[in-house]
Image (tube, rainbow, N blue to C red):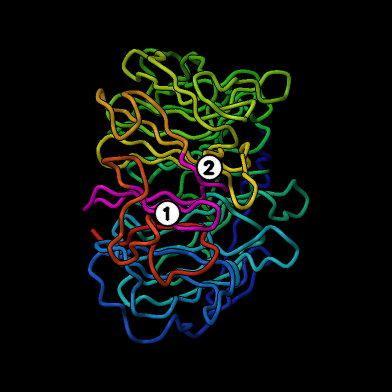
Amino acid sequence: MKLESTGLRKILILVFCLAPASLVLLSCGSTPSGGGTQTSGIKYRAFLTNNVAAGTATPGIFIVNAQNDTRGPSNPISAGNTPGMMVVSPNLAQTIVFSGNGTQFSDNQLSLINNASESNAAHLTLPGMTESIVISPDGSAAYVAVPTAPVIGQSPGILDAIAMNSGTLTGQVDIPALHYISQNNGGDRLFGFSDNSDSIAVITPSQIGIGNAVTPLCCFDRPVAAFFTSDDTIAYVVNCGPECGGTQASVQMVELTPNLCQPTGICPAVAVPAATEALIIGSTMYLAGTPYSGGVPSQPCTGQVTAATTCGLLTLFNLTTMSVTSTAVITDGYHNRIAMGANGQLFIGARTCTEIIPPTPPPQGAEIRGCLSIYNSLSTPVGSVAAGGVLIPPANGDATGIQPISTRQVVYVVQGGSLNIYDDTIDALEYNPNDPNNPGHIFGIIGNFIDVKTVDF
């Protein structure tokens, strides 16, 4: 990735209610209403984005009681034409919601939801789609990657900095094809990852809009994410490799204060089978991806009885020894969701996987397969899943939202536009007494759902 110094030194001086080319403030001088002035009164809430009109309901954010799996009494919160991805601030005070469908008619609206009042406090328009938003540890700022944003005299791609208290743009950095962002624990460093690039843009948030905020760092292999140690001295970079057009998927340690890997601090990469998504629990990094060879998926579905001809892999990686400890076969597709539920059950979501869709009505025993995998990380069986085994639930569709419910042993999963509730003790749909004839679902929730997040401690 080539970062032109002239483009990085541009300074945007903005005044509230101005409409710059890269970002248009829609709520200038007013606070848009959400779903009414009455709040739900629910103590432990889950927000659920619906991107279509369903019956009398319009697109918006449904509020669910995550303690008993019922729909809240309040109306959905307005958040654009097709609300989808959500990011919750560390203090749970606000939720950012992005509305966009990737077409020329997309509104590309970013909404800042006040969680206490359950209302849309401010909204603004991005110059394109985003799949990556991070919020600073103190909840004061958000950073948004917009890979297709037009930039005069340069290739498309920007990072926008937004004030969370007002929803206004505070600065912009031009970074071609910037797609994903990772943030360190202190909030004083961002790593930016661009499509088809082997470099990382190291961004200093305090310099955005006032100085040279970006320093390029090389050399990697299509990096897509970074995870920082608690003291922010080391970053573990996830290299996507061939799945993203590169050579070899890997994990690469970067010492931000060079010690062992002098003089740059960039340590040798350690190969893994595939990696587009990762999660760290203790000293174990769980990496999900689809192995590629010759530009096509190449992993057989060894050990699974399925009509699918290719699969993905979950890799367990020891960060202490920097080595692979084991692998497990999961669905294929592009993995971009992962979360550890209760009882050691790891939920892994993908999009554009190999789906097995039975005829209607499905014959008895017919295979149903979508983009969700559940890995049992325990040393004992859970339900029908052996220790270290994988379950592919019989549900179709992309897995677009995964939210463990911290006060209970269930996980909310949005797959194929539906909200499914999984019981971590059996790795099957939960029995919901509020809707006994429809296991794993919530009565009265109708729509095409995209994401789910809890917004209370």
Q: What residue type is labelled 2?
A: Gln
- Give the image location of residue 238, x and y in percent: 49, 28
Q: How crowded is mark 2: few (under 14 residues within 10 Å), some or many (20 or more)?
A: few
Q: Which amino acid does label 1 sit on?
A: Asn
In magenta segment, residue 293:
no
Distance from Cα at disc 2 to Cα at disc 1:
22 Å
* Residues at marks 2 and 1 touching, judged by CB atoms closer than 8 Å: no
Q: Is mark 2 on a helix, strand or loop?
A: loop
**Tag of residue 364:** 2
- Give the image location of residue 12, x and y in percent: 59, 61
Vertical arrangement, residue 98 with respect to residue 202, above or below: below
Single out the mark in the foreground, 2 or 1. Answer: 2
Q: Give the range drawn in magenta.
A: 393-422
Q: In this view, does 220 lie to the left or right of 410?
A: right
Q: Residue furthest right?
A: 153
**Tag of residue 420:** 1
- Which residue occupies 47% across, 36% down? 392
Is residue 168 in view?
no
Vertical arrangement, residue 271 with respect to residue 55, above or below: above
